[in-house]
Image: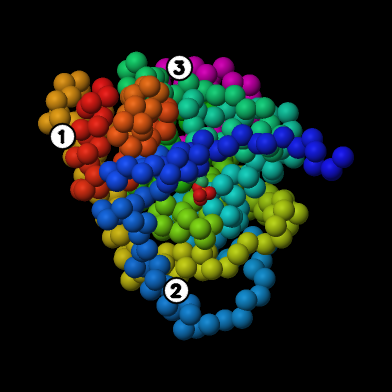
């Protein structure tokens, strides 16, 4: 028999399956709201000016392609630290943050998960219910048992904060808690600073290990506003893990640009942690690729390019907010009487629309409007040309 005779077909990625279904749909009015990316008002993936300008400079100063260090480009890692923790923060200044370049945010999560599995093999992992669909699989594949803490409450269209806090307070010491730093995927609901304080208190007093996933910095209220939670954790003096993704904020999805940062209690400790993170990288893919990180480092550290990036990110953020407001208005205009204003309270590119699985399926089969069965729609895929159609379709299935 063939070596592979017993290999089972792995389950299909539900969102990729949705894309295939969308591509095969002949409906000329079809709209894909199942995606997890930002599209501009023309329905296109943007190519940021700051990126093309940095690339032009890189091409002009063409350099041979040697290997990068295992932990990536030093200037990139430093720029990430500045963005995430603040270059002036005591943690960065004292050298107690270990940062490595990673293959996107997913790569940062995976390096952290593999390192943690060696450090605390018995620990459990808790993710939000619901969460980004890859969190569970990623930590399970790293060898962890993964559970959930309550998060979304469909009844009240928001976060069941009391239940979340109670679950954290009841978690075993050493439990790794994966938290969305901002723009929660898939619900769009974020904690308030006051709620974060309580979460931090619970994590600290219970001896839990916070792992913040930051995939959408700048898509909520602003770069500093969305990153403020990191400062709250720093102030509490807790050890923490932060994964960073530039896929969305630089529209550099395919370049795989991200990072993992680990906040330690001293520089000497951070040096030892860094040596172990490098071991994880070395034994997986040896060292990271050059291009994307070079572009991001150039943009973050060149004042004019940095300004261009911040402006372009603001344009994306403002457009998303406009689409949220417009959707609420158009739903009302299409005759929806229930209060849909929760859509404008959510942050980031996603909205839990509150629609049921049956309603989402009707949207697809009758109108060619594709969202996820959970009710998740990508508001960053709405634009001035498709929003009327989408609003009328939603109004008809509600
Ligand atoms: N974490 C969350 C919450 C995400 O939504 C995503 C992407 O959708 C990622 C991580 C992964 O980002 P990347 O594409 O940079 O690996």
Crowd rating for badge 3 (residues with CA inside 10 Å; few <14, some 14–19, many 20+): some
Q: Earlier in the sequence, mark 2 or mark 3?
A: 2
Q: Is residue 372 magenta?
A: no
Q: Calculate the distance from the C-alpha at mark 1 to the C-alpha at mark 3.
A: 33 Å
Q: Residue at horizontal 50%, vertical 39%?
A: 17
Q: Earlier in the sequence, mark 1 or mark 3?
A: 3
Mark number displayed over residue 163: 3
Q: Depth check: give the residue in front, 139 or 331.
A: 331
Comparing labels 1 and 3, the label whose residue is closer to the camera: 1
Instruction: Determine whether the residue tagged by mark 2 lies in a helix, strand or loop.
Output: helix
Q: Residue 55's mark? A: 2
Q: Secondary structure at mark 1?
A: helix
User: Of residues 385 and 138, which is closer to you in this image?
Assistant: 385
Mark whose residue sits in front, 2 or 1: 1
**CB of residue at label 3: within 8 Å of ligand 1?**
no
Residue at the image position 84 percent from the left and 43 percent from the top? 3
Q: Which is closer to the viewer, label 2 or label 3? A: 2
Picture quarter containing residue 308? bottom left
Indicate the position of residue 283 as horizontal and vertical percent values: 75, 54
Residue drawn at (59%, 44%), measured in percent from left and top?
109
* Residue 182 position by quadrant: top left
Report whether residue 344 is seen.
Answer: no
Which residue shows up at 49% across the image and 51% down it?
Answer: 245
Is the CB of the residue bearing disc 1 within 8 angstroms of ligand 1?
no
Per the image, the residue denoted by label 1 is 329
For residue 359, which numbered disc appears in the image?
none
Residue 169 located within the stretch drawn in magenta? yes
Instruction: Identify the magenta region.
Output: 161-182
Quadrant (top left, top right, bottom left, bottom right) of the N terminus: top right
Closer to the camera in the image, 264 or 141: 141
Q: In the rendered structure, which disc, 2 or 1, sits on the residue that comes first in sequence? A: 2
């Amino acid at each position: 028999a063939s070596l592979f005779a017993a290999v089972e077909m792995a389950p299909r990625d539900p969102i990729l399956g949705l894309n295939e279904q969308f591509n095969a749909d002949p409906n000329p009015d079809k709209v894909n709201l199942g995606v997890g990316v930002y599209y501009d008002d023309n329905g296109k993936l943007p190519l940021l000016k700051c990126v093309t300008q940095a690339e032009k400079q890189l091409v002009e100063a063409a350099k041979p392609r040697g290997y990068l260090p295992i932990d990536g480009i030093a200037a990139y890692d430093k720029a990430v630290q500045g963005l995430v923790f603040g270059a002036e923060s005591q943690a960065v200044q004292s050298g107690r943050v270990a940062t490595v370049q990673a293959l996107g945010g997913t790569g940062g999560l995976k390096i952290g998960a593999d390192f943690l599995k060696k450090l605390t093999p018995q620990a459990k992992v808790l993710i939000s219910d619901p969460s980004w669909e890859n969190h569970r699989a990623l930590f399970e594949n790293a060898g962890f048992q993964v559970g959930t803490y309550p998060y979304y409450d469909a009844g009240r269209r928001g976060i069941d904060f009391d239940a979340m806090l109670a679950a954290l307070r009841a978690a075993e010491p050493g439990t790794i808690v994966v938290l969305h730093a901002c723009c929660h995927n898939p619900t769009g609901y974020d904690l308030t600073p006051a709620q974060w304080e309580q979460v931090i208190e619970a994590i600290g007093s219970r001896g839990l290990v916070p792992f913040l996933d930051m995939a959408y910095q700048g898509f909520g209220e602003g770069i500093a506003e969305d990153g403020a939670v990191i400062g709250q954790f720093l102030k509490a003096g807790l050890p923490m893990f932060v994964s960073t993704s530039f896929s969305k904020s630089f529209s550099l999805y395919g370049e795989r640009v991200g990072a993992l940062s680990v906040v330690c209690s001293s520089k000497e400790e951070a040096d030892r942690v860094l040596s172990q993170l490098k071991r994880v990288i070395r034994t997986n893919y040896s060292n990271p690729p050059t291009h994307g990180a070079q572009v991001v480092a150039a943009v973050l550290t060149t004042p004019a390019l940095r300004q261009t990036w911040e402006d372009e990110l603001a344009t994306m953020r403002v457009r998303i907010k406009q689409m949220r407001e417009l959707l609420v208005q158009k739903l009302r205009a299409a005759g929806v009487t229930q209060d849909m204003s929760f859509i404008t309270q959510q942050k980031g590119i996603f909205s839990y629309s509150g629609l049921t699985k049956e309603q989402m399926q009707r949207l697809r089969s009758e109108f060619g409007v594709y969202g996820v069965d959970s009710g998740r729609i990508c508001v960053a895929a709405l634009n001035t040309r498709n929003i009327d159609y989408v609003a009328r379709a939603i109004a008809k299935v509600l």
